[in-house]
Image (cartoon, rainbow, N blue to C red):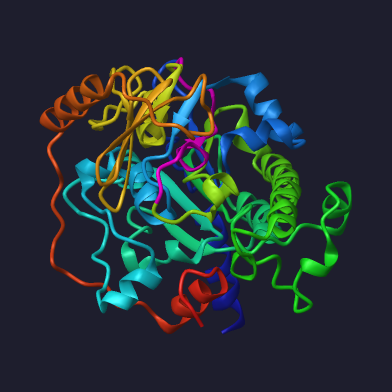
Amino acid sequence: MRYYFIALLSSILLSCTNLQPSEPVEVAEGAKRHAVVLVIDTLRSDVVSTASTPNIDSLVDQGAQAVRAWSSSTWTAPSVISIMTGKSIREHGWDYPMPAKMRARGESYPPIPTTTSTLAEVLRRKQFTNIGYYANPLLRRELGFDRGFDEWSFSTDSQMAKKIRQKMQNLDPQNERYLFYIHLIGPHHPLRPSVESRQRWNVDDKLLSKRRQGLSLKSLKPEDAYGIANYKRAYHAVVEDTDKTVGQILKALKPILNDSVLILTSDHGEMLGEHQQLGHQAWVYEPLTHVPFVAVGAPELPDLINNAVVADAVTKSLKIDANWDVTIDQQRPLYAQREGKVAISEDGRIKGIWDDGIEVYDLLNDPGELKSIDIRQNELRQIRIAFERAYEAGTITDEAVEISNEMEDALKSLGYIDE
């Protein structure tokens, strides 16, 4: 028996030494091998400039930044669906309110439409290994955000870099191809700035929850000028904390970054007292629609861009043929939609908002969208008519998704559902 075991072991070892390494996945000439999509939840564009964000700034220096980028919607689920499917809200049709309103109606969400492939599904067919880490519980599997991913798992912002480092130890970036989708919760309500950042921004500690639940939107009222001022400072503080997390993530991704296309954007912005509002309810004002869009290793960006162009920017950089509705080289107006409300701008300056009529704002002379102007209303109406004629409205199935108890608890912690 002893000699049999030795012989068997020798045979196994010999066979292992004769194993041939797996064939490396071919990459087209001039193409990037890997892709990284980094979405920072609730990050409005202007605060990237007013807060200290050296790590995001370094990506701008390495690549390019759109002059004005819009989110497709102004809350997470429909906007991320646009990012993943390369479709505007109109085209994929998933335009539902946040969970609290759906619960009040007694309605359930349908899954992500299957009428189009997601970026992960397209890349999987090209032998990519797709890895997704998300910190917003809305992105759990129930709605289908995991479609096309080999791994789709939750991580807090603070653990994200560690999780990526551990994953990188088991990867073969020289011979395989990878997509990383990383979604940070960032400056989403409730705000929990670090001690260092809240001291730098002079945030009143008394307004922070003693239970470490952060500064809550629900604790503030529109007339509370002191509370709103502190919330705005706390938002800046958390943006700076998030930028440090971005730096840690970039360091963890170092083995693939030099051969990757990297897109950094946000799913939507945040109201910080404009129009006496906080948060991201059903509005399409500029603090919500205007988000950062930075690309490293991607084709040249147009000045005006929708974040639904992520899928096209990635596949073009990888030199993979794919048919997306929203593309980099397509001349489209900026377009955002939220629960039937629509915002359109053809030039990034004159913006139309439809909500029980039309409002028109000159963003150059009135960046706060305070006074609607009468001129150019007919022009904007024609732009919207042409857009809707060119891009057919998507349809959604009647299928309903059951929300798990775990997801419901997580949504309560973010204020999506009332306790």
Most foreground residue, 15 or 206: 206
Is 240 displayed left or right of 308 in the figure? right
Query: Which quarter of the figure has residue 23?
Result: top left
Position of residue 43 relative to residue 206, above or below, is above
Magenta stretch contains residue 388 = no
Magenta stretch contains residue 289 = yes
Give the image location of residue 168, x and y in percent: 62, 49
Most foreground residue, 262 or 92: 92
Give the image location of residue 4, x and y in percent: 54, 77
Give the image location of residue 52, x and y in percent: 77, 36
Residue 41 visible here: no
Highlighted magenta segment, given as a residue range: 283-300
Residue 410 visible here: yes
Query: Which quarter of the figure has residue 124?
Result: top left
Count all numbered tags in the image, as a single digit: 0
Is 23 displayed left or right of 105 in the figure? right
Please tell me which residue is depicted at 43% across the width and 84% down the height of the picture.
405
Position of residue 109 relative to residue 261, above or below, is below
Is 358 displayed left or right of 230 in the figure? left
Is 223 displayed left or right of 175 in the figure? right
Please tell me which residue is depicted at 48% across the width and 54% down the height of the picture.
280
Give the image location of residue 151, x and y in percent: 46, 59
In which quadrant of the rendered image does the N terminus lie? bottom right
